[in-house]
Image (cartoon, rainbow, N blue to C red):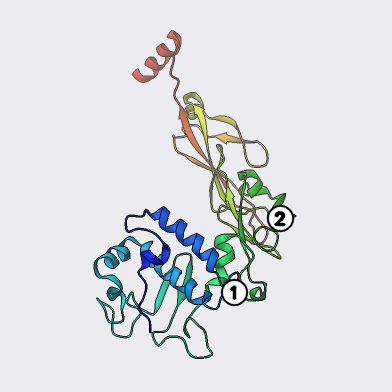
């Protein structure tokens, strides 16, 4: 078996290269040597070598160990790992955005070129690079995922949007898709469509804060209303509603509006809205207002 090449040499970077430089070099080489794009006989081994180098040099602790001990630090039985384990104390070896595993016995003749325990990194290649490579693997590969940003109100009420997604392999342009985002989705929600997944990024709202399917809002009231009670207009995600403030309401009191929250994305019904009452303290008082407050304080 030939000796392993120096990981810095594999990625074409110096020992003083920054994390960004290492990642950039890895990305360029991974695209060049991905076996679905590069049909050279040694593409598989080159791709594995690139990923292996990146796995070490992108991890500060592994990089420090490699700089000190070289490849010997990651041989079976080295350090705390038991004999026969992988280079980091187990059979698993994470390569950058690709996670794959191998057997210490090596590849078997006529079998997987990366070993019998190898998990194909090509299956998530599209999600990392956003391309569409290797059409022969589509039955096994997860849908490519794209991120889209939407407003808070579009997330809670649902919206129809037109988006552009890549067409086929990288460089083949894009295709316009009309998609319907259901009411009740949240930040990080993942929606499966026929050819792709959408991951949602929801922009926050100044008036409403979401906690699950419940909504929390804050409403300021004057001291007089807190003491005497009254009726207050409160905004919801649908329309304003009137609520009654009880006499003696304290700052921080939560008033529940049943069924005024976010629609459940699965099933019927909605969450609730909680209105947090805050006391509005005037910054400027007239002479008469000051006299009245002083009289109240002396009672």
Q: Would you name the residue on which mark 2 appears?
A: 174
Q: How many marks?
A: 2
Tell me the residue at 64%/44% (across/down): 153
Q: Secondary structure at mark 1?
A: loop
Q: Please, is residue 209 above or below residue 199 in the view?
A: above
- Coordinates of residue 44 in the picture (x, y in percent): 52, 76
- Which is nearer the eye, 2 or 249? 2
Q: Please, is residue 71 above or below residue 289 in the view?
A: below
Tell me the residue at 27%/65% (across/down): 67
Q: Please, is residue 115 above or below residue 6 in the view?
A: below
| Dot in front, 1 or 2 | 1
Compute the Cα span from label 1 to label 2: 25 Å
Dots 1, 2 in contact, CB < 8 A: no
- Coordinates of residue 174 in the picture (x, y in percent): 71, 55
Q: Residue furthest bottom?
A: 109
- Which is nearer the eye, 68 or 231? 68
Mark 1 Cα shell of 10 Å, populated few (<14), some (14-19), many (≥20)? few
* Image-based side of 133 in relation to 87, left or right: right
- Coordinates of residue 282 in the picture (x, y in percent): 45, 20
* Image-based side of 231 in relation to 56, left or right: right
Q: Secondary structure at mark 2?
A: strand
- Which is nearer the eye, 18 or 260? 18
Q: Would you name the residue on which mark 1 appears?
A: 39
Mark 2 Cα shell of 10 Å, populated few (<14), some (14-19), many (≥20)? some
> Nearer the N terminus, badge 1 or badge 2?
1
Tell me the residue at 28%/70% (across/down): 70
The image quarter containing residue 54 is bottom left
- Coordinates of residue 9 in the picture (x, y in percent): 38, 65
* Image-based side of 298 in relation to 154, left or right: left
Quarter of the image where the N terminus is located = bottom left
């Amino acid at each position: 078996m030939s000796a392993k090449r120096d990981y810095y040499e594999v990625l074409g970077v110096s020992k003083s290269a920054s994390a960004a430089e290492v990642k950039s070099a890895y990305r360029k080489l991974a695209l060049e040597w991905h076996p679905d794009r590069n049909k050279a006989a040694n593409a598989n081994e080159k791709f594995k070598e690139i990923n292996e180098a990146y796995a070490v040099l992108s991890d500060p602790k592994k990089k420090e160990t490699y700089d000190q001990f070289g490849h010997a630090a990651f041989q079976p039985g080295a350090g705390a790992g038991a004999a026969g384990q992988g280079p980091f104390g187990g059979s698993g070896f994470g390569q950058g955005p690709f996670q794959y595993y191998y057997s210490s016995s090596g590849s078997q003749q006529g079998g997987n070129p990366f070993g019998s325990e190898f998990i194909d990194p090509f299956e998530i290649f599209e999600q990392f690079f956003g391309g569409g490579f290797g059409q022969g693997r589509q039955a096994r590969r997860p849908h490519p995922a794209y991120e889209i940003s939407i407003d808070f109100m579009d997330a809670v009420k649902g919206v129809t949007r037109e988006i552009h997604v890549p067409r086929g392999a990288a460089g083949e342009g894009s295709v316009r898709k009309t998609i319907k985002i259901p009411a009740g989705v949240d930040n990080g929600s993942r929606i499966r469509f026929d050819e792709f997944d959408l991951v949602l990024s929801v922009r926050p709202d100044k008036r409403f804060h979401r906690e699950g399917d419940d909504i929390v809002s804050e409403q300021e009231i004057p001291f007089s209303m807190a003491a005497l009670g009254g009726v207050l207009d409160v905004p919801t995600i649908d329309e304003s509603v009137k609520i009654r403030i009880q006499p003696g309401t304290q700052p921080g009191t939560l008033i529940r509006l049943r069924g005024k929250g976010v629609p459940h994305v699965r099933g019927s019904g909605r969450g609730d809205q909680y209105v947090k009452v805050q006391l509005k303290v005037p910054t400027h008082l007239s002479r008469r207002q000051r006299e009245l407050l002083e009289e109240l304080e002396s009672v």
